[in-house]
Image: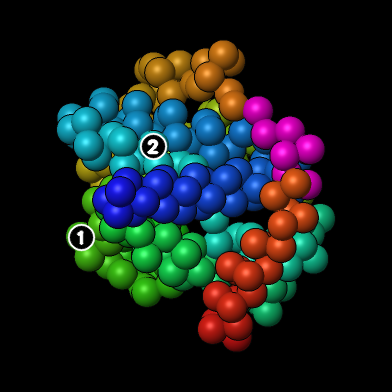
Amino acid sequence: MRQKRKTDDLDNAETLLFTLARMVEAKDEETGNHCSRLAYSAARFGEAIGLGAGEQETLRRGGVLHDIGKLAIPDRVLLKKGPLDDDEWGIMRQHTVIGAQLCGGLRSFQEVVPIIRSHHERWEGGGYPDNLRGEEIPLLARVFQLVDIYDALTNPRPYKPAWEHDRVINMLEVELSSGWRDPELCREFIHILKHSPEMLVLPADEKPDLSEEIFEEIRGTGVLSQVVKPSLAKQA
């Protein structure tokens, strides 16, 4: 009985965090199915470069959970219709640390936490939050960030229109030559984008639906303020 209760509690905690992560999409209509697309395409990219089933599953989970910390970011910053100023970027960058804190307490999410925390690091050391360099950046975070960049740029955001496919490839080639991305992984990702981009496209029948009614029900419980406000306060 005690073991079953522990299992149920774990399942409930995981479900809550996945649901909170889906709320990031619900807050910003322009991100559409960003997390769902990433969960699919990151796992497919992982498969293409020879990662095992466990690592592919971690990438899939990372697709859903990577931006969960944005629930603690004020809407005036998260949904701003224009470039962020320096102070606003400082606030936005907290989402990686907050997300890692939210998920770090669950043993079953330990493999995902490095993706959540480190997917904005850069190969040459200019990223955040820890200014990691090269192979200091966890492998799955290096894999995931390429897919995240592509999806973010090819879909509209509050501060920019969607970019064309070829424009994103050109930008990735510039970032590769500038030393921003893992060179081996970035070359492989660019090759896929040029020759078989369809493998990364989420099938229409796999897109989940999070209705406005469910979102409002979850938000009305008050759990969001209990979880994210203390985390944000720690970063202030």
Nearest the viewer among 220 and 20 is 220
Q: Position of residue 19 (x, y in %)?
A: 57, 45
Residue that mark 2 sits on = 60
Residue 213 lies within the magenta run: yes
Give the amino acid type for the residue marked by disc 1 in the picture. Glu
Sequence order check, earlier mark of 1 and 2: 2
Residue position for label 1 = 135
Q: Residue at x 28, y 34 (%)?
A: 56
Q: Which residues are magenta?
A: 209-216
Within-10-Å neighbours for mark 2: few <14, some 14–19, many 20+: many
**Which kind of residue does numbered mark 2 sit on?**
Arg
Is there any visible trace of residue 14 in the rendered image? no
**Camera-side residue of 1 and 25:** 1
In the displayed structure, 200 sits above or below 101; it is above
Q: Where residue 165 sits: x, y (%)?
A: 56, 28
**Viewer-side residue, 18 vs 53:** 18
Q: Is residue 156 left or right of residue 95?
A: right
Disc 1, SS: helix
User: Where residue 90 sits: x, y (%)?
Assistant: 60, 76
Q: Give the CA distance from mark 1 to mark 2.
A: 21 Å
Task: Tell me if residue 222 is in the magenta stretch.
Answer: no
Answer above or below: position of 30 versus 182: above
- Secondary structure, mark 2, is helix
Which residue is rendered at x = 41% and y = 53% of the image?
A: 9
Residue 104 vs residue 90: left or right? Answer: left
Name the quadrant containing residue 107: bottom left
Give the color scheme: rainbow, by chain, secondary structure or one colour. rainbow
Identified at 43% across, 30% down, the residue is 41
Left or right of 106, for residue 201:
right
